[in-house]
């Protein structure tokens, strides 16, 4: 029997989630990816195949604020930044795609910060 690795298990969860969540023009998808050191968020319109807004811990304005913060606090900064960029593009409501990750820790911090800054989901 083949052994399931955590990476392939996350990929399978992500595929199940993506079968149900589609980003439309009226309600685009907020996609989250977290690596060991960074967290990335994109607002995507799947009907057009366009990324409307993106933010990560590698962005210059966010990177300047990261000193001494833990990863959950860094995710909050990314969540507030993605919310501000999405609202600037006229996006108020989104579908949240947690990317196969559990809804806790950094993913939860990013989502709650986005909600606090005006996004509805």
Image (cartoon, helix red, strand yellow):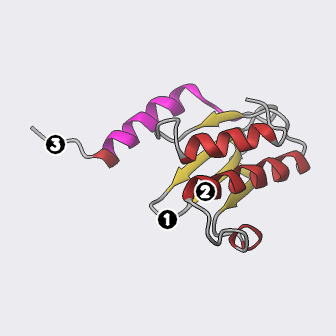
**Label placed on residue 37:** 1
Secondary structure, mark 3, is loop
**Label placed on residue 3:** 3
Mark 1 in CB contact with mark 3 (< 8 angstroms): no
Asked if residue 17 lies in the magenta stretch, the reply is: yes
Q: Name the side, left or right, on which 97 lies relative to 83.
A: left
Q: Mark 2 points at which residue?
A: 40
The residue under the point 68% across, 71% down is 63
Which x, y percent locates residue 84? 84, 51
Which x, y percent locates residue 80? 77, 50
Secondary structure, mark 2, is strand
Asked if residue 10 lies in the magenta stretch, the reply is: yes
Viewer can see residue 46: no
Q: Kindly report the distance in space between the C-alpha atoms of the residues bearing marks 1 and 3.
A: 26 Å
Front residue of 51/59: it is: 59
Front residue of 4/119: it is: 119
In the rendered view, would you say 35 is above or below 4?
below
Q: Kindly report the distance in space between the C-alpha atoms of the residues bearing marks 3 and 2.
A: 29 Å
Classify mark 1: residues with Cα within 10 Å, few (<14), some (14-19) or many (20+).
few
Q: Name the side, left or right, on which 66 lies relative to 52.
A: left
Instruction: Kindly indicate the quadrant of the structure image that contains residue 114.
Output: top right
In the rendered view, would you say 52 is above or below 47?
below
Q: Looking at the image, is mark 1 or mark 2 nearer the viewer? A: 1
Q: Name the side, left or right, on which 107 lies relative to 79.
A: left
The residue under the point 82% across, 43% down is 117
Instruction: Kindly indicate the quadrant of the structure image that contains residue 22.
Output: top right
**Which image quarter holds the C terminus?**
top right
Classify mark 2: residues with Cα within 10 Å, few (<14), some (14-19) or many (20+).
many
Q: Give the range drawn in magenta.
A: 8-23
Q: Which residue lies furthest to the left in this view?
A: 1
């Amino acid at each position: 029997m083949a052994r399931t690795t955590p990476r392939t298990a996350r990929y399978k969860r992500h595929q199940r989630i993506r079968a149900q969540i589609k980003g439309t023009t009226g309600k685009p998808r907020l996609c989250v990816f977290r690596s060991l050191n960074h967290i990335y968020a994109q607002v995507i319109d799947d009907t057009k195949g366009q990324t409307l807004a993106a933010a990560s811990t590698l962005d210059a304005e966010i990177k300047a604020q990261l000193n001494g913060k833990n990863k959950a606090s860094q995710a909050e900064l990314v969540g507030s930044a993605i919310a501000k960029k999405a609202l600037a593009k006229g996006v108020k409501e989104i579908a949240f795609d947690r990317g196969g990750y559990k809804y806790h820790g950094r993913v939860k911090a990013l989502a709650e910060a986005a909600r606090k800054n005006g996004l509805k989901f």
